Image (cartoon, helix red, strand yellow):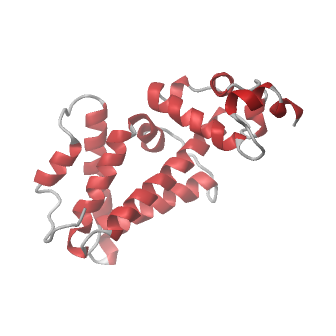
């Protein structure tokens, strides 16, 4: 632990137990600016102001670091989705959660790509932190996106609606849509609801 208590202390404001969190924060900021491809453990150490070996105390390799970022992002997504549901009338759950999903994707383009347009989740080990965090988010989405439908067709309906939302996020991210995505939700006939949602 000696190397944590010298120069790194002054650069990153490190105190016991916080280095992993600080590294994830720096990694997330770098991904948001330049994409996941720009992040390596050596570049992370430099950006965080710690010694080159320091990140390896918390992440075995680059993939483990990216998995840590993705876990936090899925947990954030669950938090904002639940927040929307808590203030929304039951008759407008679909439009409310769709609006929040699009806002999250639009505001976190490169993090969203890491979550949904990389191999991290499909290749995650069953029961791993990433697999669990992703399942929690996707199960919530599937439940709400299929609300009001028989359980037997829950999955198919949810995937169709999710594909619509995902497509909007990616089209905006790649420059094909210029308008705020929230405007498309407000005018879309694809997401039909019956009542207002308090915001």
| Quadrant of the rendered image containing residue 54 | top right
Left/right of residue 76 with respect to residue 42 in the rendered view: left
Q: Is residue 145 above or below residue 32?
A: below
Residue at 24% x, 73% y is: 89
| Quadrant of the rendered image containing residue 161 | bottom left
| Quadrant of the rendered image containing residue 85 | bottom left
Residue at 74% x, 41% y is: 58
Q: Is residue 160 above or below residue 17?
A: below
Q: Position of residue 94 (x, y in %)?
A: 25, 64
Number of numbered discs overlaid on the protein picture:
0
Q: Is residue 82 above or below residue 77?
A: below
Q: Is residue 192 above or below residue 66?
A: below
Residue at 13% x, 71% y is: 194
| On-image quarter of the N terminus | top right
Residue 45 in view here: yes
Left/right of residue 109 with respect to residue 57 in the rendered view: left
Q: Position of residue 166 (x, y in %)?
A: 31, 46
Residue 160 in view here: no
| On-image quarter of the C terminus | bottom left
Residue at 59% x, 49% y is: 124
Left/right of residue 130 with respect to residue 112 in the rendered view: right
Hey, which residue is sitting farthest right in the picture?
2
Q: Position of residue 197 (x, y in %)?
A: 21, 66
């Amino acid at each position: 632990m000696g190397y944590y208590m010298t120069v790194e202390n002054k650069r990153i404001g490190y105190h016991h137990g916080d280095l992993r969190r600080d590294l994830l924060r720096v990694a997330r900021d770098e991904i948001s600016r330049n994409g996941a491809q720009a992040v390596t453990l050596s570049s992370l150490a430099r950006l965080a102001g710690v010694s080159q070996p320091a990140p390896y105390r918390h992440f075995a390799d680059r993939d483990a670091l990216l998995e840590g970022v993705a876990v936090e992002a899925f947990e954030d997504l669950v938090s904002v989705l639940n927040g929307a549901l808590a203030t929304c009338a039951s008759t407008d759950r679909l439009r409310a959660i769709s609006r929040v999903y699009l806002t999250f994707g639009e505001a976190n383009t490169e993090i969203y790509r890491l979550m949904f347009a990389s191999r991290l989740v499909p290749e995650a080990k069953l029961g791993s932190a990433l697999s669990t965090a992703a399942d929690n988010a996707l199960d919530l989405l599937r439940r709400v996106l299929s609300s009001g439908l028989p359980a037997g067709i829950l999955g198919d309906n949810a995937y169709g609606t999710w594909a619509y939302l995902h497509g909007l996020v990616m089209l905006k991210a790649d420059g094909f849509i210029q308008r705020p995505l929230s405007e498309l939700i407000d005018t879309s006939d694809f997401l039909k609801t019956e009542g207002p949602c308090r915001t």
